[in-house]
Every structure is written in C-alpha cells, then in structure tokens.
Image (cartoon, rainbow, N blue to C red):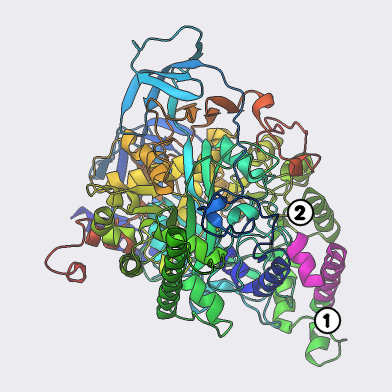
Amino acid sequence: MRLQRLRGASLAALACVALTACATTGSSGSNGDGAASGGDRDRAELATGLDSAANPDPFPSTYRGLPRENMAIVGATVFTGAGQRIDNGVVIVTDGRVAAVGGASTAIPAGHRRVDAAGRFVTPGVIDAHSHLGVYPSPGVQGMSDGNEATQPNTAEVWAEHSLWPQDPGFNAARAGGVTTLQILPGSANLFGGRGVTVRNIPSVTMQGMKMPGAPYGLKMACGENPSRVYGSRNASPATGMGNVAGYRAAFIAAREYKAKWDKWRDDGEGSPPTRNLELETLAGVLDGSVLIQNHCYRADEMAVMIDVAKEFGYKITAFHHAVEAYKVAPLLAREGICADMWTGWWGFKMEALDGIEANAALVDAPQGGCAVIHSDDAELTQRLNQEAAAALAAGRRIGMDIPEERAISWITLNPARSLGIADETGSLEAGKRADLVIWSANPFSVYARADQVFIDGGLAFDRFNPAYQPVSDFELGQPGYGVAAATVSQGAR
Amino acid sequence: MRLKSLILGCAIAALALPAAAQELTAITGGRVLTGTSVIENGTVVIQNGRVVSVGTGAAPTGARVIDARGKVVAPGFVAVDSGLGASEVSSVGGSDDLRNGANTISASFDVSYGLDPWSFTLPVARLGGITRAIVVPNHPGGGGGGHHHDDSDFAGVGHAGLQSPSLFAGQAAIIHLAEGTDILVKPRVAMVAPFGEAGAGVAGGARGAEFVQFKETLAEVRLYARNKAAYDRAGLRDLSLSRADLEALIPVANGDMPLIVTVRRAADIQQVLRLAREEGVKIILDGAEEGWLVADQIAAAGVPVLLNPISNLPGNFETRAVRMQNAAVLDAAGVTIAIKGNEGSIHRARETRYNAGNAVSHGLSYESAIEAITVNPARIFGMAGQFGELRPGAAADVVVWSGDPLEPLSLAETIFVNGQEQAPVSRQFLLRDRYAGGGEGAMPPAYSR
C-alpha cells in the first residue's frame, strides 16, 4: 500500500525535480579547442566533443580495485555459478582472478594464503541486474531523487551514472548481502529512460571509481503502465500501450537515419558532418549492438510486441526486466536468447503485476537456452537475492522440477552477468574470470546464511567479523546511532 | 459413523463449522512448535475447530492421523499491520478499502465492513503459512514507511502526502484466512494514528503541532463523553470531530482500545511514550525503526512493538539509526515484539516467515522469532490463548511444514484454519499449472483450467 500512496502523491514533487534537473542537463556539447579527433586526412576535423567516435568513453572508469592477495579458499562447498557443485572444494585466486577451481586435491601454488572455509559455502559474487542504488538513494528525500528524467517520453540522452551518488548507504548494505556487481538503471517513467551503468560494488568517492571497465552500456526501455500513466496524465503521448509502441518506432526511425548519416560521413567524408545528438547517439548504439537493451516489461503479450519492434529495426533485446509474465512465453524467450529478470514474491501491486507467480524463474529456466535472473529493483531486496532465489527454487521443486542448487545459484550470478553482457568477466568461478566471490556462513539458500567475507577482484571488500572491512558511507558518519554498541549492534553492520 | 456422534455431542459453537472442521484429527511424529515451546516427536490433536491436546502421546482412537515425522508442526502465523482481505490490486483504487479520506469518517472508519472473504490474496498468504491477520487501515495522508518498489517513476520522491483531515486512520480488525464466507474474527480491535513525519504532516507540518492537536482531540472526546445529552441538543461548543469520530475515540481516551502509533524516530518514540503516559492511552508502537536506541524506555512502559526486522536503510530523516538488529535488541530488553510482512503485508504477507528468519540471523533467538509471528500478535491484540498458539482450547490453526518454517525452501504441506483443512490452491497456482508445459500446445492455454 505504501507503493500506491507514494505514486499517487508524488506527481507534483516529481515535476519539481524534473524542472530543476533541466538546469543541469541537456547541454549539447560545446566548441572545444579543436584537438585532433583521429579522423581521416581529407575529412574536416570536428571540434572537440562533436564527434562521438573521437572519444567513445567520455567518462572513463577509474576503478582500480582493493588491495588483494593470492589465496586458496579451501574446504567449502563451492557452487561455481556455471552449474557445478564441488564439495570440499578449492578456489585458487591469483592476481585478482580465478586461477583454478577444483576438489580437495587441487594444487595450491606457493605463496597463496590458505583461507579455511570448511563447513561454509562459496559462490560467485551476487550480481544485481536491476538496481537504483545511488540514483534513488537512501535517504529518499527531496533533493536526492535522481532516477527519472520524467520530462519527455524519450530521454535516451541521459545517463544514470550522472545521477549516481556513491555515498548511498545502500551500496554497503548490498555488499554485506554478497552483491559485488550491480547495474544501476534509470527509472521507468519514460519509453527510453536513459543509459544504465554497471558498477563494481566497492566504496568510492566518485562514480568513475566504481564503474566497471569495459562493461557495455544498457539502455533502459519501459513497456506498459508507467510511461502511459505518466504522460497520459499530462494529456501527452504516450497515453496508451499503442502510444508506447508508436513512440519506440518513431525513435528508432530517427536513430536509423542518424546512424546512416554518420556512417556515410565517416565513410566518405563528404558534405557537412552530422550534428551530434546524445539521444540519437544512444539509440544508434543500440542499433550497432554496443548498447544493450534492458527492457522493463511485465506482460507476456507486450514482450512479444517488443520482440517484433526489435526485429523491425534490427536490434536485439538483451533482457526483459520485471518480467512478471515471462513464464507465459518462456519458450519464446529462450528461442530469442532474451534473459528474463524477475522477482519471486512481488505481485499484485498493479495490473501488469497481477499474474506474478513464484515459479516464474523455474519455468523460465526450463527450456533449453532459458536465462532466468532474479533481480531486486529494491535497496532491501538486493541484500537478500539469495533468499529470493531460494523461494523461486522452492516453487519450482513444489511442482516436481528437479532443480539442483548449483543450477539455481546461476539465477543470481552467471545469468545476470549474461543479462549485463559481462559473463566473460564475472558471474562464475571459472579460471580466468575476475575473483568476485562470497564465503557464506551456510548454504546460501538458507535464510540463516550470512555473507561472511566478500571479495571483489580478489580484494577483501567486506568481512562480517572485522570492522575494518565494514565500510561506512560519508552520510552515515555521525548520524543517530552511529558508533553506539547495543547488544550485537555495531556501526558497520546495518 | 463416528463423525455423526461427534456432531451430536459437540458444542453449539461448532455447529457453524464445516463438517471437516469437526473431525478428530491427530498430527503425529513431528517437531512441534507450540508458539512458546518445542516438543520433539509431538502429537497435536484437533477437533471441532480447536486444539484438543498437545503432547507426546499416541493418537486418539478413531482419529484421522497425519504423519508428520520429519516435518515441523507450527501454529498458523499471524500477519500484523496487514491489508489482507481489504485490497486486491494496490494501484486499483476501487479494489482498495484500507484508506478513507473523508473528514467526517476518520477514527470511526471501520475496515471490517470492507473485508472480502473471496479475496485472491487470502489463499496466497495462507500458502505461506498465514492463518490470521490484523487488518489495519492506512492513513490517507500517507507517511514514511520503509522502502517500497522502485519499479515506478515516482519511487523515492519523498513523502509528499495529502493533507489529511484527521490524525486517525481508522480501526483495525482481526480476520482468519479460512476458506468460506466469513473471515471476520473481531472488528474494532485497535485505533490507528501516524506520528513522526506523517503525523506532523496532518497537523500542518511540525511535530509539535501534532502533539498539541492530539491532546486537544482527546480533550474534546472526553468533553463529548461527559456531555452527550448536551451535544445532542446542540448545547455544547463546536467540536472539530464528527459525532461518529468522537464516539469511536471514547474507548481510546479511556485506555480500553489500544492505539497503534506509527512512529520511527527514537526521539518521537520517547515523546509518544510520554504522551501515552500523560493521557492514559494504551499504545502499540508500529515501525519503531530506531526503537533499539530507547529499548529500555519502551520496555519500562510495557509497550509492544510491531516491526519489520529487515528495515535497515535510512529512507528518510526519521530512520537514520535503523539496524537489522532492532528486533534482537528490543526482545532482549523485554519488549513484546511482533514481526511484520513486507509492503503492507497483503500480497507479500507470506514473507513474514522470512522476515522472522532474518531477525534470527541478526541476533534474535529462534524461540523469540516464532513467538513474534504467533503468540505475540495474539497477546498484543488481546487474543492470547485464542489463536497463534498450539494449546488446548486455541483455534486449530495448524500448519505442517516440510522443514523449518522460517526457511524459504520449506513448504506448508498441510494447512488447517479453525480445524478446517485448506485446499492447496490459489489463483497463482492455476496460472502456474496452465503454463507449466510451456503454453505452446495445439490448443491455446485458455482451454486448460
């Protein structure tokens, strides 16, 4: 019920946010100093900032990872994330990467510290494919609400990373729940909400310090009730589902033309160069495959329409988010190679969420090629994605599906990595991948399991037993309750 | 047949029960959580809708026996601060009977009239082990409240609630979740009022105004109660509340009906405790996210707390001290706590048991966690011994679990409410079964039922 109240009551507040946001966004590039753009010899060089190809990564990652050491985690039950379960396993971490994973006889290289995890469980770091940490941070008060540029239905030009507040205490809480990587997305007010950003979950003063190097951008699209309600209530388009689809198609028509102009100019250098347009640039990135579509879409029938829109314009949908009805079209999603990012327990809060069932993930996982992802969309749920996966697993088992835990763990590890286009880097404990891993106190499908230690790129990022590895954001310093020890309460463990 | 003789001999109250509820049933061999203790290899006997005995003996002769070896037998859980049976789809206003905005019907708003025994939310919650709920009205002015879905465009914008005409949201009711045509157990069991930011919003924006308004309101209620005859002949000064609201508040002013106070900040909790003491009002704290900072004061006042143990992020300036350990600290201080479900405990009421489990992993004892979802809600709402507990005479709300009921991997296998076994069916299970085969057969899914 809180949900509905907030939605209904906040239109005016939202409008205020949007107005103030106008003052700081939308600058369309500036005349620079004319530095070389790396273009062809007989083509006129564009002024700095006017050619996206000259600087394809204008807000580069400065992520450098935490101090790390080579180690061998021994004695644990290992879920690799890629489908294996290894009892009394050994995980070798060398230079921040997984060097080997195997049974008790796995050789431990010299100089590797032994970490005793007997009786415990090791999994890949949890990946949350749908988070608003930093853009809808805690505290969620006026002045901190930066997740929806709800001023026009197409804001493909905005980037969530420019709203991301790294001091959101939610990042620390998520890490204590085993989350090592997150995709931070804009909200769903718009047909095109803007670019998301994939971050490594380490404390940082800047967004760039968290940004995952090399991770592809995602573009948030939204089906359904949200865009049509937001704009329909303003007597603007879209006001209906059909208005939504007209909006997607018009945008991609424009993007095709924009891309063609730039392609031609880059090819022959003739005539005036196209004018750079951030909105169309992102959409053109979708068309050339460099920007992945992350499509908020609850209903099965709408997913099928979106698949056809994608085919009409020649792009691919990487994932449907909040795919409450994915189970109704599970074979279709598997054939199309589209991930379904889902909750287990959320349903009934609005019409398009009415048919949510707990067995959704299990049914999506069933067909060959299915990609089931458990996501959060929520600062609290992200801390317990393992439990949300457990509830989904239980629902599958209830109807007789034989789903081992070593498979279900992929719903919060390898599959979200696929959903973000980073599965070659993380998401499973396989040789060569980043050493993002969690040592759990117990089986992570138990409600009692806690993340004891969380490693990111082999660096210890959280330790439940050592306050030195329980980071506190600037916002939390000196707040009520800070530093107060009462019973088992300590400052680093919210 | 034995059933016939039982019916002849049973009490009049049992005549209202379906025949199945009257059958003598013994659940044997399980680990029995009575609500206050644990019995290994226990036997729970139920009949005529009530628990007959709980112990370790053999099943009575002639009883239907349910073999619970290797399983856990527990009382049905109680959802507190719930909207079950009074809201179908949260965003569909017409299906929501939890809030009322009229300024003449606020304290007198009675949710029990809006309850729907056919609500599709009830089987879903029941399959999560919930067999009773305290259905609590929502304040039309809104108010802070933890975190919420962020799928929406408006999430996190803050609590720009309506200006509410009244300090009071209305009166709560107790329901059971048995299949049937009547779920009401008891109406008007508590009054609801928001304090903190939400309450301040009602009074004009500042907390200090709300406390003054609250005291003034109680003074009017008492004036009215002493001078009803004068009021009826228009011989009393104008009062700010309607007659219906004044009437509804008399038991609150008298200290007979508890007031559920939504309050989060430690400073506000202290003020509310003082207010209750000064006014002689019996209160129940709801939320109390920063309660652990003043746990001893809450305990000394003998005030119970309804809380969500997974609230741990400072969503606003009245929850900056939230901690996962709130439940553990309050319990250790001697406060009677009840653990809530999520998001209004309607569609996600079934997560109550997970919340209890998370409280355990953050310091609450297992025994206290079970109490917090069984006997404590009954105690807090004046129903001790009547439900929420496996003991002779209590309502036979009994759930047989495949394992530890706080674990997500455990399933509620057999569910009794008022002694009546509940079919393991929900609208969601029907959807699931319709599409479990992939939904691509020759005949469209609509042909399967």
Residue range in magenta is B196-223
Mark 1 lies on residue: B227
The quadrant of the picture occupied by the N terminus of chain B is bottom left
Q: Quadrant of the C terminus of chain B?
A: bottom left
Task: Using the rendered view, name the quadrant where residue B444 is placed.
Answer: bottom left
Image x and y of residue A348, in percent: 44, 65
Instruction: Give the SS element for disc 1.
Output: loop
- The one nearer the camera, A429 or B210, is A429
Question: In the structure shown, which secondary structural element does the residue marked by tag 2 occupy?
Answer: loop
The main secondary structure of the magenta stretch is helix
Nearer to us of marks 1 and 2 is 2
How packed mark 1 is, by other alpha carbons closer than 10 Å (few <14, some 14-19, many 20 or more), is: few
Image-based side of B222 in relation to A84, left or right:
right
Residue B60 position, x and y percent, is 28, 40
Task: Say if the magenta span includes residue B131.
Answer: no
User: Looking at this view, is B411 or B232 the one in front?
Assistant: B411
Residue A90 appears at what percent x and percent y? Answer: 40, 17
Indicate the amino acid at tag 1. Asn
Q: Which mark is residue B317?
A: 2
Q: Residue furthest left?
A: B442
| Residue A410 in the figure: left or right of residue B187 | left
Instruction: Identify whether A449 is placed above or below A311.
Output: above
Q: Amino acid at mark 2?
A: Phe
